[in-house]
Image: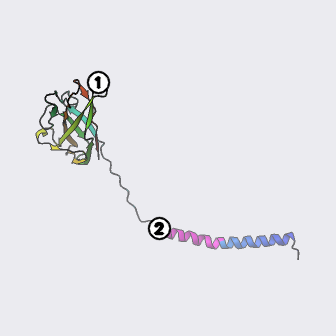
């Protein structure tokens, strides 16, 4: 049996009406189910952001007035030089400024190579000694701050630390000035 083109189009139209009817029935039901699932799966969520003041470290004093320290003179006979951060006016003073009463962490390397200015490659080892307190006048009572220490900024958002340390002069070390950079990291 051969169907005419009009019969084929009639079949296509019946299929289209059936499809539209099914879609008209099923689509609203699917949307309603999706809305029910969405509202059931989405409890209220609270979003909060705490903004804190940025941290800064300011050199305040030291043997040169910029927070730098001068370990003094070490000779072949004394073999060492030391700056006590709790009592020496040569200790470098730094001020941490940040959000009042927030906890911060202080980190630094356990030693620094001081390189001879003029004798390429010649160096000596500096071992830092860091102490700190919440008050500027508390240098003598300041507590040791080993690297990785957690501390609390004062009610005005300040914390003071003093940097001292020592060097040991090995036998036969070339005389001259040795310098290096001590890096300290502070973060909330």
Residue corresponding to mark 2: 39
Which residue occupies 27% across, 30% down?
123
Residue corresponding to mark 1: 119
Q: Earlier in the sequence, mark 2 or mark 1?
A: 2
Q: Quadrant of residue 67?
A: top left
Q: Which contiguous range is marked in magenta? A: 23-44
From the viewer's perspective, is 41 left or right of 69?
right
Q: Quadrant of residue 183?
A: top left
Which residue occupies 23% across, 46% down?
100
Query: Does the magenta portion include 25?
Result: yes
Which element carries disc 2, helix, strand or loop? helix
Between 26 and 3, the residue placed more toward the observer is 3
Residue sitting at the far bottom: 1
Residue 48, numbered label: none
Q: Position of residue 159 (x, y in %)?
A: 20, 42
Query: Does the magenta portion include 86?
Result: no
Q: Quadrant of residue 17?
A: bottom right
On screen, 64 above or below 13? above
Q: CA distance from mark 2 to mark 1?
A: 75 Å
């Amino acid at each position: 049996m051969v169907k005419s083109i009009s019969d084929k189009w009639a079949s296509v139209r019946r299929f289209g009406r059936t499809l539209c009817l099914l879609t008209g029935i099923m689509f609203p039901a699917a949307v309603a189910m999706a809305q029910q699932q969405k509202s059931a799966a989405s409890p209220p969520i609270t979003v909060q952001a705490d903004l804190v003041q940025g941290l800064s470290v300011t050199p305040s004093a030291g043997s040169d007035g910029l927070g730098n320290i001068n370990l003094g003179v070490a000779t072949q006979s004394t073999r060492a030089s030391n700056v006590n951060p709790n009592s020496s006016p040569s200790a470098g003073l730094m001020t941490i400024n940040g959000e009042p009463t927030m906890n911060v962490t202080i980190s630094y390397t356990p030693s620094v190579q001081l390189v001879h200015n003029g004798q390429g490659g010649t160096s000596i080892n500096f071992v830092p000694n860091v102490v700190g307190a919440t008050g500027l006048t508390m240098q003598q009572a300041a507590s040791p701050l080993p690297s990785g220490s957690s501390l609390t900024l004062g009610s005005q958002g300040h914390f003071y630390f003093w940097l001292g340390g020592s060097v040991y002069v090995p036998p036969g070390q070339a005389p001259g000035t040795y310098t290096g950079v001590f890096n300290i990291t502070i973060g909330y």
